[in-house]
């Protein structure tokens, strides 16, 4: 069976936590039980020795490392000089999803976890061939994760009730019409069925 | 003003042309006038000396270079041993969109144009800072193009009536809820307004 | 045992063949029996079903895809408008080293085989974990191959009598003080001992 | 004039500092005045607002992120479970070369600074087109830096008296027969002549 890792996309305090900037995304996560489902997946992974990698976003005050003006979304977010600053609580992983044995792949650019980061090297060093994806959002990050992982030759599983996007019906459509082409879709309750 | 290139995503005979495998995608392209709009964008580019790069997909009969079994979509497509074989008419760019001065970035893996290809090197060698994207599809390739290009620091413009995906309402939702975060959206009629 | 591929670095007619631009490099290849040793390695590979990938260099007349002015060496070489032009005999692999079943990874930029190419994707699609390297030169290409392959997690074997560089004593020093840190060094006669 | 950044390769306490593992490398650095010359280059950079990026190496105790067994050199170094552990003084940049405004690109794999890291993204986000390289060593890291940077289209300048390798005559030969093909070579005293 393929060696697996769990990739957790931007489940950070400033994204979907207590100091989140995106209230609609938090609301849909709560409605869909994303936090509880994510915690369930991560517990199962850790119990089986499956590595968990948090793919996080952060910015420096001077914006070095970020393509700060090239996308409408980032240009908008970074009007706030304090948005997701490295070293502040906003960039921390949600405490209920963090374990000291977890790995982190922090990036300062883009919306996807592989391009221009060490994530592929981390996974290769661990012999990983399959990634189980959860987190936010289905608008950008989860799509980017699945598209890049597929291009790199990983098998991808997306945990359908541990991901979210907005609006909610769009998130479901992304699962149906994009993610379904790239990945196996399972619920948190079933992701570890049949072993890792 | 930024130096620009046009990226044409998989406008190939075997994808949306006379020997296309995806009739629904062809139908929506025709309905949306994608072929005519694409030709209009490319004419404008060539008249201004803007490079045109066709990002094409192909497979070898022995599947070397392709991650042939890792995604549901590709596993399905490659049940056909003749699907989009390198060197066959299926991989050719639509004749009405091809010009001998165009460039091609052919890949054998994945659904997005940058990861694991020379496309970034081609664009950098030309001093390109902005890409204008058209082609198919809004299910995979155009998202991948926009997400990867944004991660690499390019500005992205998507020509809204020279792209397509299925179902049609999903394609429109992708433009609204994913592409809009990453790219400027314009129609073919207006893409070259105000110069390149 | 690790799955292996052979990487042949720039054994092209315009580099070390009948229309070579680098006579000193050709002379040292002949003196060291590089051509015969390379052919021996490739025969053994093909007999065992080990894939052979020719990593070749080429340029377009318009220099698109090449960083034509950023290095002293390339700036010098490309004063010749006909240097290693794509589609000309100069870019062909030496006939005695070519087999129709071989793969090719052609690049238009740089002096190393992995950065900004599809070579890593090709090898991953084949399940390759170890590369056996031969070709030219120990001044640039073989060093780049070994450094990049090591960074990507491949095991590397360099065939000491199927590589060359100039001056000859420098080539030997590179094998001793750089390649030896990154790779296993074997002669062509022994490379397939103990299986692949 | 091209926008420039300085890349400092592994000038860390555990590599060439007070707790260095490589005494021969320290001795040659001292003999060649590498520390003083490096400090001179960095002062000039900071005075002109030129960004300084320290390209550092580190390992985790569990080796996640490192290809720990694929190269002879690393297999040897990592027999020591405490070698260059992340979070220990060994991975710190030499205090006399560090400034709080500097950037760091830390990697856990390989011997070169670009492959599988965010360094290219950092430089692109800053608009950098030329890199000035110093540090250690001319056996691996400086070659890797120059080869990868050239492949990515950067202009490269190597500060000849702020780099070192062992044995010393080999280091000089690398400057002559490899670096000279890829980079401009200048002394620390002259690197900022004529502006940045």
Image: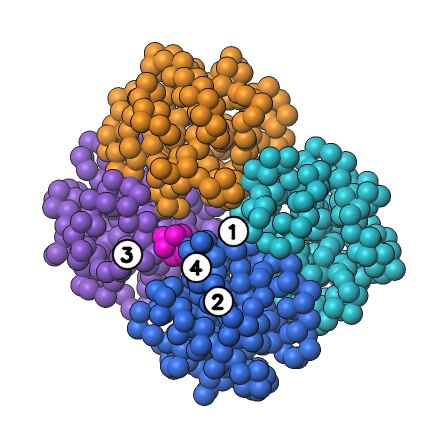
Chain colours: A cyan, B blue, C purple, D orange
Q: Nearer the viewer, mark 4 or mark 1?
A: 4
Q: Where's the N terminus of chain D, which quadrant?
A: top left
Q: Nearer the viewer, mark 3 or mark 2?
A: 2
What chain is tagged by disc 1? B
Residue at 59%, 54% (x, y): give it: A71
- The answer to whether the residues at label 1 and label 3 have Cβ atoms under 8 Å apart is no
User: For the residue labelled by badge 1, is the local secondary structure a helix, a strand or a loop?
Assistant: loop
Going by the image, does A118 lie left or right of C44? Answer: right
The total number of labels drawn is 4
Residue at 48%, 57% (x, y): give it: B130
User: For the residue labelled by badge 2, is the local secondary structure a helix, a strand or a loop?
Assistant: loop
Q: Distance between the residues labelled 1 and 3?
A: 22 Å
Tag of residue B193:
2
Say which quarter of the image contains residue B177.
bottom right
- The answer to whether the residues at label 4 and label 3 have Cβ atoms under 8 Å apart is no
Q: Distance between the residues labelled 4 and 3?
A: 17 Å
Q: Nearer the viewer, residue C65 or B37?
A: B37
Q: Which of marks 4 and 3 is in front?
A: 4
Residue A162 on the magenta segment: no
Instruction: Give above or below for D119 relative to A123.
Output: above
Q: Give the residue pinned by disc 1.
A: B152
Which x, y percent locates residue C185?
33, 39
> In the rendered structure, which disc, 2 or 4, sits on the residue that comes first in sequence?
4
Residues flagged by tags 4 and 3 on a common chain: no
Q: Which of marks 2 and 4 is in front?
A: 2
Q: Distance between the residues labelled 3 and 2?
A: 29 Å
Task: Identify the magenta region.
Answer: B116-127
Residue at 44%, 77% (x, y): give it: B40
- The answer to whether the residues at label 3 and label 2 have Cβ atoms under 8 Å apart is no
Q: Give the residue pinned by disc 3.
A: C63
Q: Give the residue pinned by disc 4.
A: B4
């Amino acid at each position: 069976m393929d060696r697996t890792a769990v990739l957790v996309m931007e489940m950070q305090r400033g994204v979907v936590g207590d100091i989140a900037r995106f209230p609609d995304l938090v609301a849909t996560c709560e409605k869909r039980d994303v936090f509880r489902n994510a915690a369930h997946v991560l517990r199962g992974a850790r119990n089986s020795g499956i590595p968990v990698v948090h793919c996080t976003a952060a910015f420096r005050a001077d914006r070095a490392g970020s393509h700060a003006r090239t996308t409408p979304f980032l240009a908008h977010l970074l009007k706030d000089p304090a948005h997701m600053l490295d070293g502040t609580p906003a960039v921390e992983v949600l405490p209920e999803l963090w374990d000291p044995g977890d790995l982190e792949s922090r990036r300062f650019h883009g919306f996807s976890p592989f391009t221009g980061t060490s994530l592929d090297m981390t996974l290769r060093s661990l012999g990983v061939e399959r990634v189980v994806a959860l987190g936010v959002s289905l608008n950008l990050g989860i799509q980017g994760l699945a598209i890049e992982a597929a291009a790199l030759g990983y098998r991808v599983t997306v945990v359908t009730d541990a991901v979210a996007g907005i609006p909610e019906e769009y998130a479901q459509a992304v699962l149906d019409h994009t993610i379904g082409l790239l990945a196996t879709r399972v619920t948190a309750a079933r992701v570890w069925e049949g072993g890792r």
